Amino acid sequence: MAQTVVARSLRGFTGAGYDKGRPLLVQAAWFAALHLLFVKWWFPARWRPVLLRAFGARVGERVLIRHGVRVHWPWKLEIGDDVWIGEGAWILNLEPVTIGSDCCVSQGALLCTGSHRRRSVTFEFDNGPIRLEPGSWVAARAVVLRGVTVGRGGVVGAGAVAHRDLAAGAVLTAKGVSA
């Protein structure tokens, strides 16, 4: 079966329907705070949740966020209690990301709510929220893509890519889902 080839014209990209959620000045202030303070090894871990809250994130108690963590838009982030986010994790939340209580997002993990319509000539957005249910774990260098819910106690193993919902208690490895 022959595949249809889409001739891209990125010049025509509009970003239609995407709302950043805050004015440009707030976006700029966040990027300054992110790059000058939040990601730095010397910035105290106990202040990272405070800084996120100052920019509109809903962050629970006893949340540990290590250095090198990047959050695209704090106002589109909700984190429960007793959550750990490891060094170098990236929360690319063009849409809302919800991290339930007792979750772990390990070193170098990526939560990416953004994508593009592959059949769109102008490559328009095809974004979707991400939800990590309580007790779930996104292991080192794992990726959770847009629109995915990781069920309660589910595990996205090291290096795995979750491109569809993961049932409660399920384990996704780089080789597939196991019970």
Image (cartoon, grey):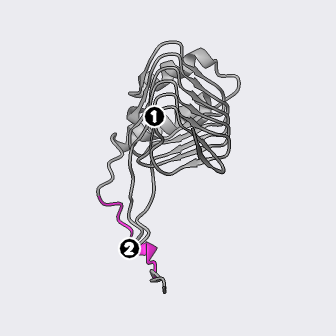
Q: Residue 15 placed where, x, y %?
A: 36, 60
Left or right of residue 160: residue 28: left
Q: Residue lying at the far front in this picture: please name it.
A: 179
Left or right of residue 65: residue 9: left
Q: Which residues are magenta?
A: 7-16
Left or right of residue 155: residue 16: left
Q: Residue 175 placed where, x, y %?
A: 66, 51
Q: Residue lying at the far left in this picture: please name it.
A: 17
Q: Nearer the viewer, mark 1 or mark 2?
A: 1
Mark 1 lies on a secondary structure that is: loop
Query: What amino acid is at disc 2?
Result: Gly
9 inside magenta stretch = yes
Query: Disc 1 versus disc 2: distance between alpha carbons?
Result: 38 Å
Mark 1, Cα crowd under 10 Å, few <14 / some 14-19 / many 20+, is many
Type of secondary structure dominating the magenta stretch: loop
Question: How many dots with numbers?
Answer: 2
Q: Residue 53 placed where, x, y %?
A: 43, 22
The residue carrying mark 2 is 12
| Residue for point 34% across, 39% down | 22
| Residue for point 52% across, 28% down | 153
The residue carrying mark 1 is 151
Q: Earlier in the sequence, mark 1 or mark 2?
A: 2
Q: Height in image: 58 above or below 31?
A: above
Q: Height in image: 47 above or below 15?
A: above
Mark 2 lies on a secondary structure that is: helix
Query: What amino acid is at disc 1?
Result: Gly
Could you tell me which quadrant the C terminus lies in? top right
